[in-house]
Amino acid sequence: MKPLLDITDVSLSYHSLSGETPALSHISFQLMPGEFLAIVGPSGCGKSTLLNLICGLLRPEQGQILLDGTPVTSGDCRIGYMLQKDNLFEWRSIYKNVMLGLEINNKKTPENIAYVNHLLEQYDLAEFKSARPSQLSGGMRQRAALIRTLALKPDILLLDEPFSALDYQTRLEVREDICNILRSEKKTVILVTHDISEAIAMTDRVLILTSRPAKLLKTINIESRDTLSSQKYFDEIREVLK
Ligand code: ADP
Ligand code: MG
């Protein structure tokens, strides 16, 4: 099987008047279709920079990023991006919010509309179509944001600390919800998080980055999620991050 995402020897520095800030150094990894990957690393190490490169918002100074064999471009519809803030618009109903991506990209085909309606049904938001975002719980809002992203049928989803704005209890529920949705929609996912247990609970493989400029320090395959193994992975990752 060919990798969906192929990252080879990518480096990037930010340049400003005050000088150069190296952010990423010689990063290489591959992602297979359907795989869930977590990226963990100290705050400010370059995780968001890496996602911005993968989605084409930034270009690597060195190295190459291929999605399904071709370079990504800014605004590439093959990539869905979800951030910490759900960015739902209060002046639009939930239905109009989840339709937004299709609207902007001129993709409101009957087939795509049916798919969004199916997702709303499937993930318990159908009866909230005409509600405003503020009428929904944090978890429901995050589900709505995910459906808006899935509407464009991206090949790969990038999640940048998507749950860190939620309180602890909600975060546990939402991450399970979102994980189930992504697995049943058979998505390929990269989750950036500084929450080690979240990485272990949600993904198949954890990449650990060094502090800035980020280098790949270690990869850990999550083979089992029972309590004992999870604790073992947790200790191992924490030890590496020290
Ligand atoms: P993380 O997501 O891991 O917290 P980022 O990728 O956001 O880290 O940032 C990595 C480093 O690059 C940080 O030190 C940050 O200050 C710096 N940085 C991020 N964006 C810019 C920018 N546009 N210009 C200059 N430096 C930046
Ligand atoms: Mg970040």
Image (cartoon, helix red, strand yellow):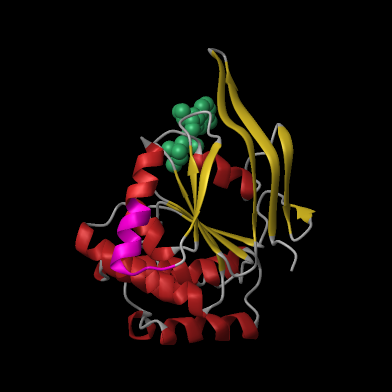
Which image quarter: residue 173?
A: bottom left
Of residues 10 and 113, the one nearer the viewer is 10
Q: Residue 178, relative to residue 233: is it above or below? A: below
Q: Is residue 228 visible?
A: yes
The x and y percentages for residue 4 are: 69, 62
Quarter of the figure with the N terminus: bottom right
Could you tell me which residue is drawn at 61 percent across and 72 percent down? 153
Write down the quadrant of residue 126 in the picture: bottom left
Q: Residue at x 56, y 86 (%)?
A: 114
State yes or no: residue 91 in magenta.
no
Residue 92: x and y in percent read: 40, 67
Which residue is at 66% across, 62% downward?
A: 77
Pick whichever, 48 or 195, lies toward us: 195
Quadrant of image for the C terminus: top left
Q: Relative to the observer, which residue lies in front, 45 or 87?
A: 45
Determine if residue 86 is in view: no
Most common SS among magenta residues: helix
Kindly indicate the quadrant of the structure image that contains residue 162: bottom left
- Tag count: 0
Relative to 37, is 175 on the left or the right? left
Please give the name of the residue rendered at 32% of the width and 49% of the height, measured from the top-left corner. Answer: 235
Of residues 178 and 89, the one drawn nearer to the viewer in this rendering: 178
Q: Hey, which residue is sitting farthest right in the picture?
A: 69
Point out the stretch of residues depicted in magenta: 224-234
User: Residue 24: image x %, image y %?
Assistant: 58, 33
The x, y position of residue 127, in whole percent, is: 33, 85
- Is residue 232 part of the magenta span, yes or no? yes
